[in-house]
Image (spheres, rainbow, N blue to C red):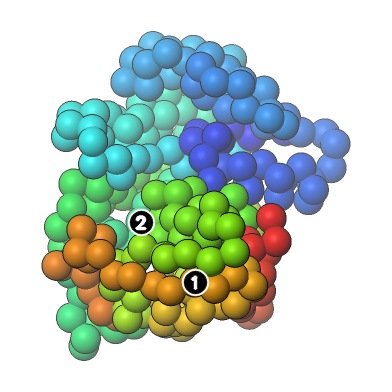
Amino acid sequence: MNIVITGAGGFLGQHLINYLNKTLSKDFSIFSFGNKKIPNCKNYNIDDISDKEQINLAISSIKPDYLFHLAGTSDNSLDDDSIKSVNITYANNLLSSLEKNNLHNHTKIIVVGSSAEYGTIKPNDLPINEGLKPKPKTIYGKTKYEQTLNSISWQQSHRKLVVVRPFNIIGENIPKHLAIGNFYSQINLMPYKGVLKTGNLNIKRDFIDVFDVVCIMWKLINNNKAYGEVVNICTGTPSLLIDLVIQMISLSEKKIKCKIEKNRVRNDDIKVHYGDNKKLISIIGNYEFIFWKKTINKIMQA
């Protein structure tokens, strides 16, 4: 059994690799694409993800039974074309290569979108379900939504593809560009006291443990009811960001004060943002999500 994971070196990718290595039998191989060596998987060197021929050669050689397309970027320092190349072109090249190699009816596929696709949310839109028409505002949200539309369109004449929209993922080794990762980094560098620089903490988000996300993705990719669907991966419960920060400070056993900095406050920040997971549960059945306090404990102990 061959499994391809794009974005394998990222936060979600690393946890997915660990999950698969612990869950599956020994008769499987995990492959990553790119020019960086990723631990616990085989690397297939690809210099340019926009190069159809390189992608096609990789797919032809590996003949994946599973494809997890996790690659994506929200890096605001990149120009729009570079973001489109990662968030749109890469997925298109992967899907066309599967078809070219007559694997489109064989390979099981997860395409990772984002809750950012929904864009600006009004109070009466909550909880956000998959039927809400996306109105993305950022280049990241717009390109991820285009990736979703292309993927679902491709799937209509084929099979075994599901698009997932994870909400606010947290967990061990969370990167610094995410709020909780940034706060952890700041706290970790403090001696015994200090000032934690933050943005607006009085916002509610749907925080979900990264373990739950990878576990659910594995359930979805192997469930016939999921194919052709867009599925929120969320707990369905909003939590105050400040509560998570208070827990982090308490566990640090340091004397820390929070300071809101203007450059960290987003004028367009949505006060409450959480998903509806009824569709998810209808597909995978009842699921017990890890409570965020347990996740914060793991982050702080790492």
Residue 62 higher or lower than 148, as above or below: above
Q: For marks 1 and 2, give the one nearer the viewer.
A: 1
Which residue sits furthest bottom?
A: 124
Of the numbered discs 1 and 2, the one sitting upstream in the chain is 2
Residue where numbered disc 1 is placed: 256
Q: Secondary structure at mark 1?
A: strand
Q: Amino acid at mark 1?
A: Ile
Q: Residue 254, position in %: x, y?
A: 59, 70
> On residue 45, which mark appears?
none
* Image quadrant in which you'd find residue 77: top left
**Does residue 149 appear to the left or right of 105 in the view shown?**
left
* Image quadrant in which you'd find residue 287: bottom right
* Image quadrant in which you'd find residue 155: top left
Q: Give the total number of marks visible in the rendering.
A: 2
Q: Secondary structure at mark 2?
A: loop
> On residue 114, which mark appears?
2
Q: Amino acid at mark 2?
A: Ser
Residue 212 higher or lower than 282, as above or below: above
Q: What residue is rendered at 64% in x and 34% in y?
A: 3
Residue 179 seen from this side: yes
Q: Residue 97, position in %: x, y?
A: 42, 23
Residue 268 higher or lower than 71, as above or below: below
**Does residue 122 appear to the left or right of 245 in the view shown?**
left
Q: What residue is rendered at 37% in x and 22% in y?
A: 49
The quadrant the C terminus occupies is bottom right
